[in-house]
Amino acid sequence: MMTRHLWAAAVTALAPTFLAISANPAFAHHPMGGATPQTVATGLLSGLGHPIIGIDHLAFVIAVGLAAAFTSRRFLTPLAFIAATIAGCLVQVAGTALPIAETVIAASIVALGTLVLSGRARGSFILIGLFAVAGLFHGWAYGESIVGAEPAPLLAYLAGFAAVQYALALAAGYVTLRIWNSAGPAAIQPRLAGALIAGIGVAFLIENLEALILA
């Protein structure tokens, strides 16, 4: 009973924040207000903030933790996503464009949210493949806010967003296992989180497909 109450309280507390962020997409993708970090401190803060205030990226990171929780390598599997985001960020910094990146990102959220919603365990290698592909595109989008930065702020940025993503994924996995293993109706709630994540992905996917059609 306590677990259900805590879960409901967390969702209730975070919902207004998610709505406020999603209503302001410019803020959601630029932790430093769009300015390129100039110091190690600003690079680190930007890296720590970016995965949290971008609701599409945050949804996927949480889904990474939810999905990885049901594998035998729940501490290692999320690292595939994190490593790929670093690679994707460096691809962006190098000036290489990835095609329809935002559409792929939205589709990846739908796919992983649906996987979590199914409630079925997946092999680590399947998830690693999905995490690696999705991470490349998510990281490429992350890199937009660090293009033009000096090496020191860039490295601090990479360290910041790698650390916060790993922490979020592990925390999501831990909460998921606690709820899933509890008795009674609370066991279904991680799957409902998957539905919410998939819904966020669908909203972003429709928005991006409309933009492609109208372009």
Image: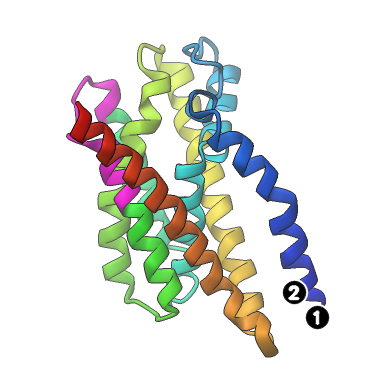
Q: Name the residue under label 2.
A: 4
Tell me the residue at 69%/89% (across/down).
184
Image quadrant assignment for residue 149: top left
Tell me the residue at 51%/46% (across/down).
58
Q: Which mark is residue 201?
A: none
Q: Is residue 57 above or below residue 5?
A: above
Q: 65 left or right of 150?
A: right
Q: Is residue 134 magenta?
A: no
Q: Dot 1: few (<14), some (14–19), or many (≥20) neighbours within 10 Å?
A: few
Residue 34 seen in the figure: yes
Q: Is residue 143 above or below residue 14?
A: above
Q: In which quarter of the image is the C terminus?
A: top left
Q: 106 left or right of 56?
A: left
- Compare residues 40 and 19 and report the one nearer the observer: 19
Residue 87 seen in the figure: no
Q: Count the labels in the image.
A: 2
Residue, far bottom: 183
Which residues lie in the magenta part?
Answer: 91-107
Q: Is residue 101 magenta?
A: yes
Q: Name the residue under label 1.
A: 1
Marks 1 and 2 close (CB-CB < 8 Å):
yes
Q: Dot 2: few (<14), some (14–19), or many (≥20) neighbours within 10 Å?
A: some
Tell me the residue at 80%/80% (across/down).
1
Task: Give the alpha-carbon distance from disc 1 to disc 2, as whole Å.
Answer: 5 Å
Q: What residue type is labelled 2?
A: Arg
Image quadrant assignment for residue 182: bottom right
Secondary structure type for disc 1: loop
Secondary structure type for disc 2: helix
Q: What residue type is labelled 1?
A: Met
- Compare residues 74 and 133 and report the one nearer the observer: 133
Q: In this view, does 80 lie above or below 157?
A: below
Tell me the residue at 38%/67% (across/down).
114
